[in-house]
Image (cartoon, rainbow, N blue to C red):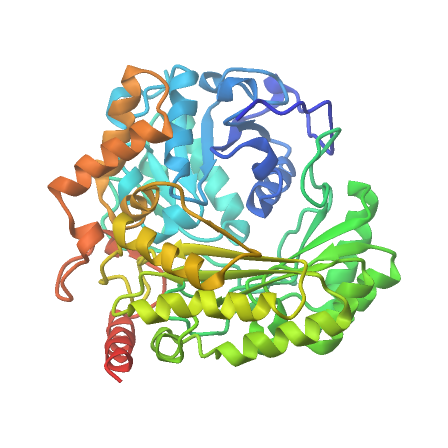
Amino acid sequence: MARPRVVLERNVVVKNWKRADLRLCLCSPSPYEVGFLNLALQILYGLWNEREDVLCERAFVNVLGGALSLESRRSLREFDVLAFSVHYEAELVGLVNMLRAAGIPPLARDRRPGEHPILIAGGPVVTENPRPLERVFDCLFIGEVEDVSDELLDALKEASEARSLDPLADLPHVYVPGLSCNRIRRAFVRDLNESYYPTAQFRPEGLRVAFGPAFLLEVSRGCSYKCRFCLARQIYRPMRVRRLPRLLEILDEGLERTATDRVSVISFAASDHPELTEILESLLARGVSFTIPSLRVDRAPARALELLRESGQVSVTVAPEVASERLADALGKGIRPEEVIELGKDLRKLGFSRLKLYFMVGVPGEREGEAAAIGRLARGVRELGFSRVTVAINPLIPKPHTPLQWAPYVGERDYRRRVELVRREAGRGVRLSGLEGPEGLLEVAGARGGPEVGEALASASAEGRLSRRRALLVVKELLRRDARPVLGYPLEAELPWEVVDVGVRRGEVVSEYERFLEALSR
């Protein structure tokens, strides 16, 4: 991807390099156009720069070659700590390339304390399974950082000065390969109303992106539903909400400091916020246009939909996931195809002209007719009169800590065959999108693999910049040698990611998997 033309940024923090006791660079292995919309980066950048003794700058994979920080244009090698926020398994390719571009050996065993920065990573990919990255990073943070930020920064500062990782190994939420003895507990924010929130969010000016640079407003975190395939349900539990008074404080300060009239509402389960209608009415009263993430088909409040339309939006996104009652029950989704049609009718009455539907194929035990049913449902939605119906079809990736963590992955050939079944049934007028080529294998390896994944990708980058194509060839060879991430793990097996304690009992996950299998047999 071409380097974006970031002509000017708002809310950039520039500090005196010499006066800082700890110099960090927050690194995004995603392009700038994606990274600045990442709430985690906004939180970390604002939170860490609030400390007078800490300097925090940023680097993105496609800006300045991924080797220099945006603020001071210094090489990543000059920082005390490089902190990577990893949100998608495919980002493993970008982070290896960033290290190579900066002249930093991507394997921890090749780096020397004092000569190279300490490398730490966090984010959902790390929390689900830190093992694929344990030979690349010196330490890996598990969970949400806000409530333990000072503790983490102090340990990083001490480790940098002592040229030793021992201070980090003492933290209960940090995994230090070779030093950590106990399972690593997930850190989480207990009360969103009391936690830090960034109101001066960095944003580009002069860069065109979808919906424009919007203020990110997180209204809740976690999800109250029990979908058996969902990673977010497990690693962001329990569901927590920000109440209206706190949200209005954030909103008013954020709109002023970020200088925008657009808001992106952030939530895994916006439909379940007890004050969603009041939140949207407050946005509308301030003359703000807004977007809402994917809505729950059977829980989309009528008034919320009206307010969304009044704000000028013409498109809605929902995620039925499957179009079979049997699979919906097995997955714990519980949404019926007729409910999707009924929601579509309601949306058309309100004047919405576009609808995007998210589905997945390759659920263990899925029948061909159940994949084809997705196409028939999409055709039924199109016939309601929408000018555009988009159907995103992705393969089910069994994720760690979920009840499907032992299940097999569908594989490229069967995935493509199912997508073609959907295409034929959907007919003309429905836009289909999905994964290109065997990219699901990269996600499978990053989610369910072990230390060999990061090592193989890092080693492959020694021959030059690691392309996605080359990374997929490397991963295919790994999975040929050890096919368990694809074929699934035995129920009694010790799983790579069990070094992490996300707060879910194994017995509970096993019981849910057995219920899944039982539901499939009906």
Could you say where residue 314 lies in the image, as x and y percent from the top left?
73, 59
State the residue at coordinates (35%, 53%): 128
The foreground one among 384 and 87 is 384
Q: Tell whether 274 sits left or right of 81.
A: right
Residue 227 vertical placement versus 518 (above, below): above
Label count reads 0
State the residue at coordinates (38%, 51%): 127
- The reply to whether residue 5 is visible in this rendering is yes
The foreground one among 280 and 140 is 280
Could you say where residue 259 lies in the image, as x and y percent from the top left?
82, 41
Could you say where residue 513 lies in the image, as x and y percent from the top left?
26, 73
The foreground one among 22 and 38 is 38
State the residue at coordinates (46%, 29%): 82
The foreground one among 372 and 274 is 372
- The reply to whether residue 304 is visible in this rendering is no
Could you say where residue 522 lies in the image, as x and y percent from the top left?
26, 85
State the residue at coordinates (50%, 49%): 145
Residue 192 vertical placement versus 134 (above, below): below
Residue 301 appears in which quarter of the rendering? bottom right
In the rendered image, the residue lying farthest to the bottom is: 522
